[in-house]
Amino acid sequence: MKRPGILAAALAVAVTGLAPGSFRAHAAASLDKSAGASRQAFPTKPIRFVIPFPAGGFSDITGRVVAQRLAESVSQPVVSDNRPGASGNIGADLVAKAAPDGYTLLINSINYVINPSVVKAPFDPVRDFTAVSLIASGPPLVMTVSAATPWKSVKDVINAAKAQPGKLNFANSGLGSSPHLSIELLKSMAGINVVQVPYKGAALAIGSLIGGDIAVVFPNLPVVLPHLKSGRVRGLAVTSARRSPALPDLPTMAEAGLPGFDVSGFLGLLAPAKTPRSIIGQLNTEIVRMAREPDFIERFAAFGMQPVGSTPAEMDRFTREQIAKWAKVLKEAGVSPQ
């Protein structure tokens, strides 16, 4: 069932509470009619979620969950459209150039705020988009070592790196990837120098960790969780600002001695710039509502994520802060947009 907008509902309460007699009834009827017209104004056709990564990936799986729930809420189909390439920039560019009518939206993640420091794009990540809402935070990465090592804490690894500068091998799954950012942030904050070994995926890196070829790996929590449970690898800390409900006994990197350390994924929703505020408001209301639903919270907990549901202004501020943060880290690492 479609719902009246929050503003229309608030106005209805205000007017009917103040207007006397027949005027109150007339005003209420007029507002009901206006609210009905507003409900019909958007959406009246399918909405497209552009997911800038391949089908089956993390952004795709979680984005489709949101698309399904939004479709149920607004009584219109929400179609997931995978447009992978250029670390997410191909899909983002498509949405940046789409009509600002609320029918073409972008599912964005951590790559979106990293890319400006790594890849030159034909759009501005702030100017060419309008924030709708942060959907969820996470999953964090887990600083992980082999169970065969003597290291029991982040401090142990830092001390080992300082004792053997430029010798410890850390797995890196690509320029600008979350593991790469975690390593660079660790190097910067702890004042250490390590060797970064490229891997095509977390599974291969974890295999090398168990085999003793790699000292430290920063895999996503859902990927490493089975290995932590098996006892073949040891988690030292999560990279998020808060502890993960999936590993409540594991400290954050900040708690482990690196205040301010935070590398965590997120899922958000963006619209093209100049999308009307009324449409952004409607979409935001739906995202915030679903983020509060117990079954949605439970579904995302299985991904190691925590639903957020922010205001557009909060998401816009978060985006700007994250872009600036990673620009500084990557600049210090000698990385510049190619």
Image (spheres, rainbow, N blue to C red):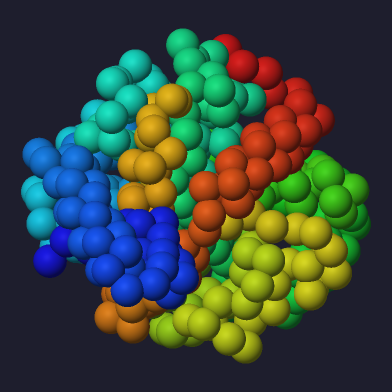
**Which residue is found at the position 89% from the left and 48% from the top?**
191
Q: Is residue 71 left or right of residue 173?
A: left
Residue 235 picture location, percent across and down: 59, 75
307 or 336: nearer the viewer: 307
**Which residue is found at the position 10% from the left and 50% from the top?**
76
Residue 330 picture location, percent across and down: 71, 31
Depicted 211 relative to depicted 55: above or below: below
Depicted 260 relative to depicted 195: above or below: below
Residue 287 picture location, percent across and down: 36, 59
**Residue 323 appears in the figure:** yes
273 or 82: nearer the viewer: 273
Q: Is residue 137 left or right of residue 230?
A: right
Q: Quadrant of residue 324?
A: top right
Depicted 208 relative to depicted 150: above or below: above
Q: Quadrant of residue 336?
A: top right
Q: Quadrant of residue 200?
A: top left
Residue located farthest toward the bottom when viewing the structure as drawn: 249
Residue 337 picture location, percent across and down: 61, 16
Image mark count: 0
96 or 220: nearer the viewer: 96
User: Which quadrant, please, contains the N terminus?
Assistant: bottom left
Residue located farthest toward the front when viewing the structure as drawn: 21
134 or 203: nearer the viewer: 134
User: Which quadrant, please, contains the C terminus?
Assistant: top right
**Residue 270 appears in the figure:** no
**Which residue is found at the position 53% from the left and 40% from the top?**
177
Q: Is residue 105 left or right of residue 330?
A: left
**Which residue is found at the position 48% from the left and 81% from the top?**
246
